[in-house]
Image (cartoon, rainbow, N blue to C red):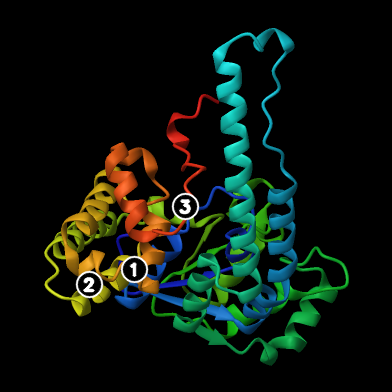
Amino acid sequence: MNNKRTILLSIDSNIFLSFYDFSDYDLEQLVKLVELIETGKIKLFLTQQIVNEIKRTRDGIVFRAYKKFVDSKIAFDMPIICQSYPEYKEIKSYQKKLEKVKADLSKKLWQDINSKTLKAEEMINKLIKLSCILDSDQVLNEAEKRYLLGNPPGRKKNTYGDEINWETFLKFIPTDNHFIFISDDEDFRNPLNENELNSFLIQEWEKKKRTKIIFYRSLTSFFKEYEIDIELRWEEEKDKLIKELMMSPNFSTTHEIINKLSKFINFSNKQVKDIGLAALANNQISWIAQDVDVKDFYESNVLSRTSVFEENELERLKDLFFPNDNKEIDEINFEETPF
């Protein structure tokens, strides 16, 4: 991966759809990919077939993931012999609080699902807009012939979406650099080594395109090999923006900084605490705490990390952003729950 030219990349629909489901993926990977495309280090190619697969499959996958989450039980079975211990009541109390938090999250999640405002959705749509869409309708005849001949990647019956994608790549992907394809579809894999592309496809690609094709099964494996300093630069940018937020001289600047910080998904404990303390110390933040963008950012990134703050700091933040809320039920410190 030492080639300095722009990387030519395509990502299969199953990778995008994994971000809606239960998987080990981190949404930060999509943010990272956007950055690399916007800076010209990567050029993303998507076939119209891939885009259509994402759009038509989205609802079913999201609903199954939502239902699995809603149907999951928050339970900690304890025998009767535990009842005489004070920890028994403490565990039961935590369980009730967790059930309430889960119910609240379920409502928010369902609203975002229906309004198509999930964070994963936002990032996937952005990647589609940044990509070069290849007209896969132009290769329908070639794809059908490949299907009838039984050539890889086709194994599925009565459908040849994989064949359409492959024929589109063969026809339209430029030859000014090697091509990287990320997919977890077993139809593309080598039966002898599931982490390699089917050898028939490799030979076909090299013969027709005169370039190399590199195959990965996940974005994680791709980023591990593609060594970049983007992580370090991101942390430096976050720290710089947080310092600017602490010193924000007016409402307009505060809104601008909050907008920039909102593009990030993960913050360290120190960064979260600094963002929280900034709201308590700088009235250019506290005076607009009820503005939608400011309140949403703090609710998602700060008030959800209760263990970072001292009790008095947390109460002041709650009073600032949710002054009228019923405080009978406190926030849960997830990092200190006993199970």
Specify which label sits upstream in the sequence, 1 or 3. 3
* Residue 302 visible to the viewer: no
Residue 144: x, y in percent? 80, 81
Q: Nearer the viewer, residue 205 or 186?
A: 186
Residue of label 1: 294
How busy is the neighbourhood of tag 3: few (under 14 within 10 Å), some, or many (20 plus)?
Answer: some
Residue plotted at (49% across, 29% down):
337
- The mark lying in front, picked from 2 and 3, is 2
Q: On the rendered structure, is 304 left or right of 164? A: left
Residue plotted at (88% across, 72% down):
158
- Report the residue that reaches farthest toward the bottom: 138
Residue plotted at (68% across, 63% down):
62
Could you say whether the residue bearing mark 3 is in a helix, strand or loop?
helix
Q: Distance from label 2 to label 1 (Cα)?
A: 8 Å
Could you say whether the residue bearing mark 1 is in a helix, strand or loop?
helix
Specify which label sits upstream in the sequence, 2 or 1. 2
In the image, what residue type sits under mark 3?
A: Thr
Residue of label 2: 254
Residue of label 3: 220
Query: Residue 40, relative to residue 267: is it above or below?
Result: below
Q: Quadrant of the C terminus?
A: top right
Q: Nearer the viewer, residue 73 or 56?
A: 73
Give the image quarter of residue 149: bottom right
* Badge 2 vs badge 1, beta-carbon distance below 8 Å: yes
- Report the residue that reaches farthest toward the right: 158
